[in-house]
Amino acid sequence: MSQSLDRDLVLTVNGIAYPVSVDHGRNLLSVLRTEVGLTGTKEGCDDCECGACMVLLDGQPVNSCSYLAAQAVGREITTVEGMVRDGELHPIQRNLLEEGGVQCGFCTPGMIMSATALLARTPDPTDEDIRIGLSGNLCRCTGYAKIIAAVRRTAADLRGE
Amino acid sequence: MLIASTLDDALAAVAAGARPIAGGSDLVVGARHGKAPLPASLVAIDRIAELQTVTETADGGLVLGAGVSHHVIETHPVITGHFSGLADASALVGSPSTRHVGTIGGNVMNGSPAMDTGAPLVVLGATVELRSTTGTRTVSIGDLWTGPGRTAAAPDELCVAVHLPAPPPRSGSAYVRLEYRRAMEIAVVGAAAAVTLDADGDVASISVALSAVAPTILAVSGLTGLAGRSVADVAAAAAEAAAEQARPISDLRASDRYRRHTVGVMARRAVEAAARRAAGETIAVPVNRALGIGAVAATPGAPS
Amino acid sequence: MTVTEPRPTNDAPRPRFVRADGPDKVTGTGRYTADLTLTGVLAAKFRYADHTHARITRLDVSAARSMPGVLAVLTADDVPDVRYGPFVQDRTLFARDVVRFEGEIVAAVAATTAEIAQRAVDAIVVEYEPLPVVTDLEAALAADSPLVHEGWESYGSADPIVRDRNDASFSSITKGDPDAAMAAADLVVTSRYVADASHAAPIEPRAVLAQWEGDKVTIWTSTQVPYDARAGVCETLELPANRVRIIVPHLGGGFGGKCGFHYEAHVAALARAARRPVRLVFSRREEFLAPDRRREGMVIDITTGLRRDGTIVARTGWIAIDNGAYTADSGFFPQLAAMHVAGPYRIPNVRVEAHLVYTNHQPSGSVRAPTAPQACWALESHTDELARAVGMDPVAIRKLNAVDTGAEGPSGQTYDEIGLQQCIDAATAAAGYGGELPDDEAIGVAIGWWPSFSAPSGAYVRIDGDGSGQIITGAQECGTGAVMTLRQLAADELGMQPEDFQLIYQDTSVAPYDMGATGSQTLFNNGRAVVAAAGQVAEQLKQLAAEQLEASPADIVLADGQAHVAGTPSRSVPITELAGIAAGGELLIGHGSGQPPGAPPLVGSSCVGDVGMAAFIAPQFSCHAVRVKLDRDTGVARVLEVSTAHDSGTILNPVGAHGQVEGGVLMGIGQALTEGTRYDDDGRQRNAAMLEYKLQTCADAPTIRTTFIEIPTPDAGPRGAKGLAEAPNVATAAAISNAIAAIVGRPVRQLPMTAERVWETIADAAEAAAQDGVAS
């Protein structure tokens, strides 16, 4: 069924339905950060270049800064706040900490979402897969080495190795 | 905004003046940067099932629904195997997220001269299926673009599919792009080539098209006389023709002089890679990374 | 001396250091400034200059003020008439009469929504009389150049600053008789190098939120230097320090870009005028255009005289540094740049002169090792030219001339034990320097140095009744982990675990002064303060334990959460128990600052414009060896491997230290190849967006190997530590330059060495070779 949307939308974020009322043309990022009230997703640029705003939409990575909130209706949105399950850090979160892949932390939420999407489609990635998979997420602090190490280790953890 | 679930609903909305939107990146980023305000009426076409399909035709051709994403193209075995130049291009578009959200229809209809998929579509002989509430027509890809960001489509027409004819036997294609970084680039220059080899391993037919060196994707002309020559000769001649026919501008990304030189280099590399694929060699997608060309300096053939 | 084994970072043993702020950052619960809001908050927007140099002839905000939803519009008329600046007082909060760069603020608006604020900004009427635009550094120094500041002579400035017209700060270092030595040299090599400006580009754009309660203001801001920000607010809004509270939530990176005093006063003034909280959040474009923290463009001339055996006998240099329109913290740049053009070499005869030149560009300010990457790139590229001129190996010429323990440097400083020679050996060995490579690859080598910055700093340490601890410090964490490492220092002093401590930091009203996350100084100085503060608590604990254990306090040892009698571990009492006793009496509170190390003496040199940068306290040294692959057809260079060796003294936090080197190297690669600001003829930035200003991506990141040459350094930080955050950024671009030059046969003389510039250099080399062929 085609669906005509006005200001009133329901967005499903981390499994919770949020009714919101927003102007035409609002991007998903600003609605997540303002109406939904989840500020873990960051804004670092405004043209899909930095990846700080990365969320998952039905499991696929999306730059929420350049995606209309209305287009996310009926899809499952996952943000960094949805990564902790039953009070436990997701392995990618734990490994980023233990490998030293977090410095200022501003790119970290987006990095976590991109890594999660990468490992869902490529459970046993090569280093090149990881580099390309995270290439839409800029980090200015780490030089990426420890982030790559964390993703490599997470892949092994998730495969049960 | 209308979220269309059927093509008919989408066509009706477009006929009523709505702007179609798939991933929306170009439109939303453009609006935020003040290029053009976001249209008041939008129809989302990313949930129309029939626009998402990749269909092989009986004669070996391919129909790509306009909503097929770059991610699907770069990973689809038929496309990477037989329409490799297109897969090369889609695999280089933006970031993984851009490739999930961005579609072939959006790329084609956005009409940027720097688009990556345009040059391979030209050398693969693509046609575009435009549909409105009153009918359907097919336009050759070269006739679609009328200028930077402009197409021959009427306001009520929606791009519904891209058709690719069956590639001839002993043919191959490739798209090579100049990259300053190994990811997240926009074509400074790019070149696609489709090559068919004869029984002797010489070139039976050759087609080359260029990105970002003219107001629209530029098909290199005057190559038909090269039939029967060796791959090396054809690659050199194509490079020379590409550099000569390019009408590049100088901007932030490069000078016209540098673009003219490098588009020749890209054309030569595209022909060489396409010929290797035509000879039956499997070169992974994207050829830029597989061969370490474009972003990575290397002798062609030496994986970095 | 201990040398830690060189090993690929990725194979490093599983680290134990987990940042105290890490859980906040990986779960998205940690708040950055732009994540904060307050009831009734208004949105701030700035009206920027429409010209890069013009006189304001009309400024009318009446239409903006009368728009519904607009609660405050401010211009220069609405704030105290204060000129400020740490070295030259040439700046005002809002443009007064003249605008001098595109990011200069003419007016500020606070409104109920960002959209209304923007409409109000657009409704402000400004008319201008254009003035001549100054963008060329050499032309700006000419006697007949138009002035960026007509009234420069009337400005106040710090004592050592030497100024003249568009020259905002002149400095020179002279030693020996360079003219005579140059005349006597066997060989003289002269080079010119030009570096474009670049940006710190932290991923978090800056944000400020201000709220007044009565006559006190609280400002949450994304600054690296909370106390500096407070001083700026106090100075420009004429407030006493104790009525201004600066709080920094988590900071999303800085790299120097968020040093200094920026927009805290603008937002505070808006909030006071609107009588509502006001929040400012920068767009990426504003982040590029407005802050006075761009990495400075430079023109560098170097001449070196050598003996045939490669011994350097004299060096002269001339440097012009683009100051931009106002003097932020750039007053010390000339002397620092002069030191980096002289370099960490034993040169008996030196004269380097450096000018800080006003232009109508965005102001320059400290970005990670200010002036050093560019100056090192020029000097070290020049050094490879010297090697080619005398037919020596580039590493050998460095080993021959580089400073060592006990040697005298170019400014007349004699070094205590240092590890530069070991750095050269370690980095080149790790890189496999000298081995066979394909003809499109080469390894380039460069050495660098950087001072440690000594400054006053304070901290409190307390242990509460349950035995849990708090470190209350003025230090600022910008991501490096330096503040995080303070827990380890306190824990070691008290025989406790780092996890026993919480950190309270980044709040000027709760913790004593610290300079902030600048100059790689946090552990160097605040580490000393925390050790001193924890030491006081340790004394208290020992006193209590002595009473419990009937021993002398001098015999009590704190270890493993226990206080025990030395030599008799069984006679012990848990620290938690002592804390419980203290909670009922004299509380366990320590405070510390300690004496900052003083500057080493200089002998035999003289400095004009001496701002204290010619004497390097606890100098850090480094050598980077970089393997580069070059596509000769296109000029695209790719960095395949980087091997670094750093003497930063004792390494207190190996995980953090490796992270600093890796991040600094990648930033250096960006500066080397893709990051450079492009200006139009009017001095406007043409690539103020991430798409056109290209940071290195994950796909570009090479393998980075790091060796630390750990030499406990006297007169340094805690346990002989030096700074580290800036040093890794110094030598990378230079090493890449030398690799490219080795492949091409000559250096690329402009930074960044973009593909097109490399390609042009290749073409020039080919042309020269063809002409040589014709000539012979």
Image (cartoon, rainbow, N blue to C red):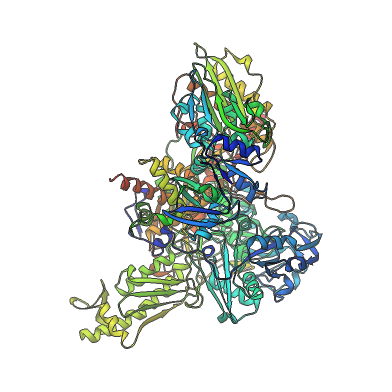
Is residue C172 visible in the rendered image? The answer is yes
| Quarter location, residue C298 | bottom right
Q: Position of C706 compared to B296: left or right?
A: left
Indicate the quadrant containing the N terminus of chain C: top left, top right, bottom left or bottom right.
bottom left
Q: Position of residue A80 (x, y in %)?
A: 43, 55
Is residue C734 visible in the rendered image? The answer is no
Q: Position of residue C373 (x, y in %)?
A: 55, 54
Q: Which of the pair B166/B7 is nearer the observer? A: B7
| Quarter location, residue B193 | top right
Q: Position of residue C467 (x, y in %)?
A: 30, 77
Indicate the quadrant containing the C terminus of chain C: top left, top right, bottom left or bottom right.
top right
Q: Position of A53 compared to B264: left or right?
A: left
Q: Which of the pair C212/B243 is nearer the observer? A: C212
Q: Position of residue C299 (x, y in %)?
A: 66, 53
Tell me how many marks there are. Answer: 0
Q: Residue at x 70, y 76 (%)?
A: C80
Q: Residue at x 55, y 25 (%)?
A: B163
Q: Residue furthest bottom?
A: C585
Q: Which of the pair B211/C513 is nearer the observer? A: B211
Q: Is residue C169 above or below residue C443?
A: below
Q: Residue furthest front?
A: A1
Q: Is residue A20 above or below residue B80?
A: below
